[in-house]
Every structure is written in C-alpha cells, then in structure tokens.
Amino acid sequence: MTTKFKNLGRTGTVLSKKQVYDGPIFKLYKETIKTPDGLEVERDLIDHGNAVTILAMTADDQVVLGSEYRVGRNAETVSLPAGLINGDEDPLVAAKRELQEETGYVAHDSQVMTAITSSEGFTNETVTLVLTHIDANERAERHFDHDEYVNTQLVPLAEVIAMMKRGEIRSAQGLCALNWYLNFVREPNQWILMKNSLIWRRANHTMI
C-alpha cells in the first residue's frame, strides 16, 4: 500500500438511516453519517446489488460485444456482457450464467481480473471484472428477461480498441475491463494492434 494515504479504509459511523425508495433493482436511503474526520454529513445512498462485467474472448482475439437499449442514455449502446450477482453468489458463477443467458456463449477458464466501485459518491455497488474464454462454435440457448434483447457480435480486439478510441464504447465497466486486460493481463510484448497498415508495439511505443 502506498505511504501517501495512510488512512485508507477508515469507515464512517451511520447516525441515522431512512429508506425512501424500494425498487426491483435498488433501494434508496437517506443517511446521516459521522465521517472519520469528525464531520456530520447527510448523504443519499443507492443500495444496489453487486454485478459482473465479462470480457469474453476467442482464441483468435475476438471479443463478445452486445448492443441494447439503455434508459440512462435513451439510446441503443454497445458494451461487454454484464449482469447482477445473486446474493452471496461467486462472481465467476454469476459471470458464467450471465454470459450464457445473454449471449449463448459458454465460459471456460474464467478468472477475476479485479473489482471496481461504480460510483462511490452515491452507491455501494461493486462490479467484478471477469476474463473468460469461449469457443465461437459452442453456443447454448439464450434466456432474456421479458423486457430485454441484446444483439451479440464477435468483434476483433483491434476493432474493439478502435471503437474505444472513437467513443463508441462508453460503458465505464466495459472500458475498465478492457483497459485492465490490455495493461495488466495481456503480455505487453505480445500486444500488437493492427489498424489499416499500421502496427503499434506497446513495448517500445513505436510505429512500424
């Protein structure tokens, strides 16, 4: 742990907590809290179930992407597969289930890359980023919710990175998963991105 922030992890004391909304996905509370620094503050907290975001890849570096309508942007958007964790369910179990239900692809050799907090200022949601491998020819039946439909495609990794640069992938969890994979999981010396006739080698930051 860095020595710059010696008090990381200090918790506040909840002085009062009132539920003001109870929905199918999240609950909303108004809380009065005494912070670790002694301040008394009022905050709104969205109590949201934890989730997984899945980076599913084939052996030849194709990535599973899906597009669907998202009310937050009132538009059809593209993102990695994702879904909620059921209670104390293992994130890898949740990732396998959500990937198959949403895309039909079957997860193999899954691993947790990291976990992120989606928006610490007002929600307690934690999203686990999972890397998994799939066989493009192995598909199972998809199971959508009654109000859900996802258009699933396999997209080459180089094109996915180009989509990120063009701002076509804007989901924070998806961007985190892709960047974590590219920076910390994929062997840096083997990361070769092809766009048109250019090859960019991350190891020495040179164009060929």
Image (spheres, rainbow, N blue to C red):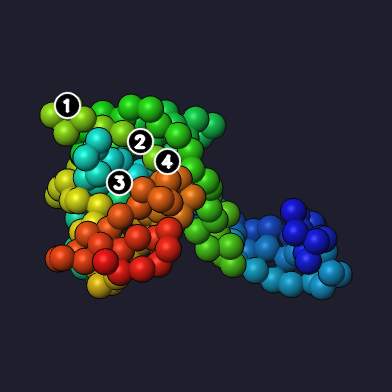
Q: Position of residue 141 (x, y in %)?
A: 16, 28
Mark closer to the chain start, 4 or 1: 4
x, y percentage for residue 98?
32, 36
Of tags 1 and 3, the one toward the viewer is 1
- Cβ–Cβ under 8 Å for marks 2 and 4: yes
For the residues labelled 1 and 2, the Cα–Cα distance comes to: 14 Å
* Residue at x-position 68% and y-position 58%: 17
CA separation in Å, label 1 and label 3? 17 Å
Residue type, mark 4 in image: Val
Residue 178, percent across and down?
38, 54
Is 202 situated above or below 154?
below
Q: Secondary structure at mark 1?
A: loop
Q: Secondary structure at mark 2?
A: strand
The image position of residue 158, as x and y in percent, is: 24, 57
Describe residue 14's horizontal placement relative to residue 125 as left or right. Answer: right
**Label 1 CA crowd tier, 10 Å (few <14, some 14–19, many 20+):** few
The front one of 93 and 86 is 93
Residue 120 appears in the figure: yes
Foreground mark, 3 or 2, reads: 2
Discs 1, 2 touching: Cβ within 8 Å: no
Q: Is residue 50 visible?
A: no
State the CA–CA distance, disc 3 to disc 2: 11 Å
The residue singled out by tag 4 in the image is: 130
Q: Residue visible at 51% across and 34% down?
A: 87
Residue lying at the far front of the rendered structure = 208
Residue drawn at point x = 25 percent, y = 44 percent: 61
Residue at which label 1 appears: 138
Q: Give the CA separation, mark 4 to mark 1.
A: 19 Å
